[in-house]
Image (cartoon, rainbow, N blue to C red):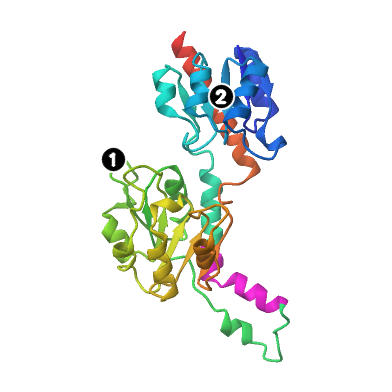
Amino acid sequence: MRILITAPYNEQGQQLLAERLGEVIYRPWKDKGTAYNESELISLISETKADALITEHDHVTRKVIETYPDLQFIGVCRGTPSNVSLGTAAAANIPVFHTPARNAQAVAEMFIATVIDFLRHVFDGCEWLEGKNWGEGAHTSYLQFKGNELAGKTIGMVGFGAVGQRIAKMVENFPCNIRFYDPYLMEYNPVYVKTSLEDIFKNCDIVSVHLPVNESTVGMITKDLIATMKPDAIFVNTARASVVIREDLLYALENKLIRGAILDVFDHEPPDEIDYKIIGLSNVLATPHIAGATHEVEDHHVTIMNDKILNWFVQKN
């Protein structure tokens, strides 16, 4: 078998696949700077005579799969295989593997870092300091940038998959109280409280979104929910922007209906005018979709992907 890998993949992971399954051809998309588009991917599979594909962000479209319906598998090094035409793959009986939880630690750490930065006015304080605003009053900064502790806060998770549960585990000993809304999760640590979506927004100090994008989640968070949040509550979204009606969030932020927002995702990337309007607000801490961007994430997805592929071949044979 010839396996084309366009995702970032460490040498140890490549070697294991080569030893167990055959030849590995490594053409990471990062070397060219952008994901392979449809035509580029079709050409690359033809050039390498690949029998299987492990990708990350490349456009594995219907045309790609119909051009190569005999691929033995498609691996997607992402939390969801959203760049693959899953229906076409299913019709061709091509298994599709992905790597849920690959970035759970990275996103959880980013959540804690940015929430604490927000609560403690860290970036405002840094800007004030760099502006040489420290006068003779020794207690000026102490009074001006006095913030809040994360300890004691009630955090509400909208979606309680790998990322939400990792955050909960990391903050429960601050201590923080954890509530979550996830109608699909039946088994969970009883220290966490399963509740309604309405309760999350109405009663939590921090509301954090951890939803995938599908027909039931797009536009799910509207002004009706946001309007019920406490005036000093913080809204956090490190998942997907499309689950929130951004105009409703913008209205709440502009009118100081809530304390503020921490956002890592936007409706348009690069942002459009409305996105930048949100990003520029004084009560918004915005980062450029980097919550899951660590070097370690690439090692995590290699481990998860190799386990899935090799276990599948063991079961198959």
Residue 310 x, y percent position in the rendering: 53, 18
Q: Which amino acid does label 2 sit on?
A: Asn
Q: Which amino acid does label 1 sit on?
A: Met
Look at 62% across and 82% down and name the residue there.
141
Residue 11 x, y percent position in the rendering: 70, 27
* Tag 1 and tag 2, C-beta contact below 8 Å: no
In this view, the mark in front (1 or 2): 2
Q: In which quarter of the image is residue 154?
A: bottom left
Q: What element carries label 2?
A: helix
Residue 145 x, y percent position in the rendering: 57, 79
Asked if residue 46 is positioned above or below residue 249 in the image, the reply reads above
In the image, is residue 116 part of the stretch drawn in magenta?
Answer: yes
Residue of label 1: 186
- Taking the image as drawn, is residue 116 in sight? no
Q: Nearer the viewer, residue 158 or 264?
A: 264
Cα–Cα gap, marks 1 and 2: 28 Å
Look at 69% across and 27% down and name the residue there.
27
Asked if residue 103 is positioned above or below residue 317 in the image, the reply reads below
Residue of label 2: 306
Asked if residue 17 is positioned above or below residue 81 in the image, the reply reads above
Extreme residue in the bottom direction: 136
The span picked out in magenta is 115-130
Q: Dot 1 surroundings within 10 Å: few (below 14), some, or many (20 or more)?
A: few
Which label is found at residue 113? none
- Taking the image as drawn, is residue 250 in sight? yes
In this rendering, would 294 be left or right of 185?
right
Q: Nearer the viewer, residue 218 or 105?
A: 218
Between discs 1 and 2, the one toward the N terminus: 1
